[in-house]
Image (tube, rainbow, N blue to C red):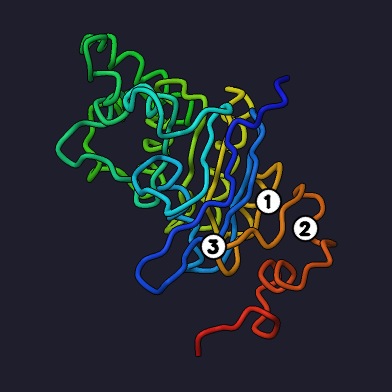
């Protein structure tokens, strides 16, 4: 296995006016690893993800993918290496489910034919526990849990090297959240993909993570294996994972 991290963040900063959201993020994610980023609302988790994808430009620091600057090379080729499960699903309401799943594969000069794309979409839908007849439905005809599964099928459709999961269980009941967590874990391991998940749901953290990184005040407050979070000795992490009102993290009252 290569010693070069799949994703490497070195001193990444991002401010919006006087608000310093990222104040020097240092973090390495190994190939094939499932890293979960935790932290309170407004701590910069989503901003960090957008910086990695190039949707936002950091003010300073380096973002490397396989040791190469993320902003070098062909933009389309760069993005083709990623899959993404969005927090709100972000499905196209006007397209049937199969077209949502295979959307990327229907673009560009090497796009699949309609029949090929539909067949592949059905295969991916089966992988996330949905029957073939779902393929011709529209997103509005699906439950929240089914929409989340469709989003997951789309995220893996192009066999990406890296998958981002943005609050994957938001809006789901505990049982469905557990199902989605289990699916994510199975699929990441099966594909050998590198995963980065943003969440504040501790059940997701424990189900998905190989390693955990907690962001506080724009920096990585603590990072380590999932098995060490309960005995980390870090007061910030301890307060967060146990949902305590009292501690070094000040709550807005």
**Gap in Å between the C-alphas at discs 2 and 1?**
8 Å
Closest to the observer, 61 or 120: 61
Q: Considering only order in the chain, which callout, 1 or 2, is on the residue closer to the N terminus?
A: 1
Q: Residue at x 78, y 67 (%)?
A: 234
Within 10 Å of disc 1 (Cα), the crowding (few <14, some 14-19, many 20+) is many
Element under disc 2: helix
Q: Which mark is residue 212?
A: 1
Residue 208 visible here = no
Q: Name above or below for residue 105 compared with residue 57.
A: above
Q: Residue at x 58, y 54 (%)?
A: 25
Is residue 11 left or right of 133 when viewed as pictured? right
Mark 3 or 2: the one toward you: 3
Residue tagged 2? 229
**Gap in Å between the C-alphas at discs 3 and 2?**
23 Å
Within 10 Å of disc 2 (Cα), the crowding (few <14, some 14-19, many 20+) is some
Element under disc 3: strand
- What percent of the width, then of the height, locates residue 200? 56, 61
Element under disc 1: strand
**Gap in Å between the C-alphas at discs 3 and 1?**
19 Å
Is residue 250 left or right of 19 when viewed as pictured? right
- What percent of the width, then of the height, locates residue 188? 59, 30
Residue tagged 3? 23
Q: Residue at x 37, y 35 (%)?
A: 150
Q: Considering only order in the chain, which callout, 1 or 3, is on the residue closer to the N terminus?
A: 3
Closest to the observer, 174 or 16: 16
């Amino acid at each position: 296995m290569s010693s070069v991290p799949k994703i490497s963040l070195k001193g990444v900063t991002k401010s919006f006016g006087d608000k310093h959201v990222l104040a020097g993020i240092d973090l390495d994610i190994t190939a094939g690893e499932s890293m979960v980023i935790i932290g309170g609302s407004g701590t910069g988790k989503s901003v960090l993800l957008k910086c990695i994808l190039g949707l936002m430009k950091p003010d300073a620091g380096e973002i490397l993918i396989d040791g190469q600057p993320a902003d070098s090379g062909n933009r389309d080729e760069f993005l083709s290496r990623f899959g993404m499960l969005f927090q709100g699903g972000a499905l196209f309401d006007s397209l049937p489910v199969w077209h949502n799943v295979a959307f990327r594969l229907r673009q560009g000069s090497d796009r699949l034919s309609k029949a090929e794309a539909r067949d592949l979409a059905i295969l991916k839908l089966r992988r996330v526990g949905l029957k073939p007849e779902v393929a011709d439905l529209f997103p509005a005809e699906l439950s929240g849990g089914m929409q989340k599964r469709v989003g997951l099928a789309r995220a893996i459709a192009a066999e990406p090297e890296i998958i981002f999961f943005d609050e994957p269980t938001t809006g789901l009941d505990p049982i469905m959240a557990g199902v989605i967590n289990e699916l994510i874990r199975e699929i990441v391991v099966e594909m050998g993909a590198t995963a980065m998940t943003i969440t504040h749901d501790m059940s997701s953290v424990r189900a998905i993570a190989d390693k955990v990184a907690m962001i506080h005040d724009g920096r990585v407050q603590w990072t380590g294996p999932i098995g060490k979070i309960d005995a980390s000795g870090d007061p910030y992490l301890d307060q967060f994972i146990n949902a305590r009102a009292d501690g070094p993290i000040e709550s807005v009252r």
